[in-house]
Structure formats: C-alpha cells, structure tokens
Image: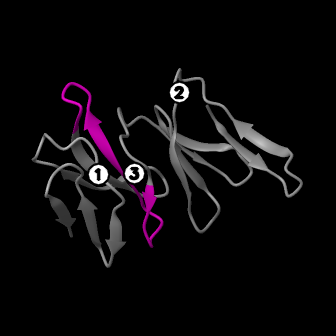
Amino acid sequence: MGIYSLNPEGNIRWKMLPDEGTTSAMSPVIDRNGNIYIGFKDLYCLSYEGSILWKKNFYIISNNLLIDGLDNILFTLTNPSQAALESIIQIDQNGDIVNQINISTPSIAQYYSPAISNNMILLPIPFTSMILLIN
C-alpha cells in the first residue's frame, strides 16, 4: 500500500511506498501549500513533489485524517489493548501536537464523519446515541 501522484496523462509522477508491513492507509489530506499528510503505521508529511518532509509515530491512528482552516491535522488514537478511542489529536504542519483531547468513554471505537466549525468539532458516535461536541 502506498500513495501515487499521477500526471495529467495518467502516468506515475512519483510514488511513496512505506516499508511498514501495513495493508491500509488513512485517507490523505492536503494543506493549502500542497503538503500531503497520510497515515500508515506512522503519520507522514510529503511535499507536493513526493519527498518525505517528516514522519511521526502515533501508535494507532484509527480514523481518517482531517484538516482544519488553519492547516492543522486532526485524527484519533486508539488504545491497542482495549481497541477503544483514546484521544483526539490536533497537530500543526511540523507534526507538533497543538491539542490533545482525551476521551473518557472507553467503549467508543470509532466515529462517523465529523463536522468542523469555528473551533468546534462535532463527532457522531456509531452504534450509540452519543454525539461528542468538542470546543
């Protein structure tokens, strides 16, 4: 599994294939400068040209990546021993943690498409009647 960049003719411009023994990748996001963020086992930031700008280990990224209006990347971490949502992480373009919100309900394993607006995140939780509002 990897990420490929294609030219307008459909030919491969560049590809990035991490050697992590992983079979899946979290949906990539692109910031306004063209940097690409993608989570495999590690979280990568790639330049538009395909070079790795940085790589950080966040032990289990459990859902798709999001990007906010300030080009911060948001994702969730799952506790590997409980298979439960542990925290929501917000990082900046350098991969430094801006904010970390710990989730106190360990039975939550995932969320559905969140909405981001004016410094708030709305997370519908599947198979429950819960909606998390984080501001």
Mark 1 or 3, closer to the camera: 1
Secondary structure state at the residue bearing disc 1 = loop
Give the number of the disc on residue 96: 3
Q: Residue at x 51, y 48 (%)?
A: 27
Which residue is denoted by mark 1 in the rendering?
Answer: 111
- Residue 61: x and y in percent read 38, 40
Would you say residue 25 sits in the magenta stretch?
A: no
Give the CA separation, mark 3 to mark 2: 26 Å
Q: Which segment is the magenta one?
A: 66-84
Q: Is residue 110 left or right of residue 107?
A: right
Question: What's the amino acid at mark 3?
Answer: Asp
Q: Residue furthest right?
A: 9
Which residue is denoted by mark 2 in the rendering?
Answer: 23
Identify which residue, 67 or 124, lies in the foreground: 124
Q: Residue at x 37, y 37 (%)?
A: 58
Local crowd size for mark 1, using a 10 Å CA cut-off: few (<14), some (14–19), many (≥20): some
Question: What's the amino acid at mark 2?
Answer: Thr
- Residue 82: x and y in percent read 18, 29
Q: Coloring scheme of the render?
A: one colour
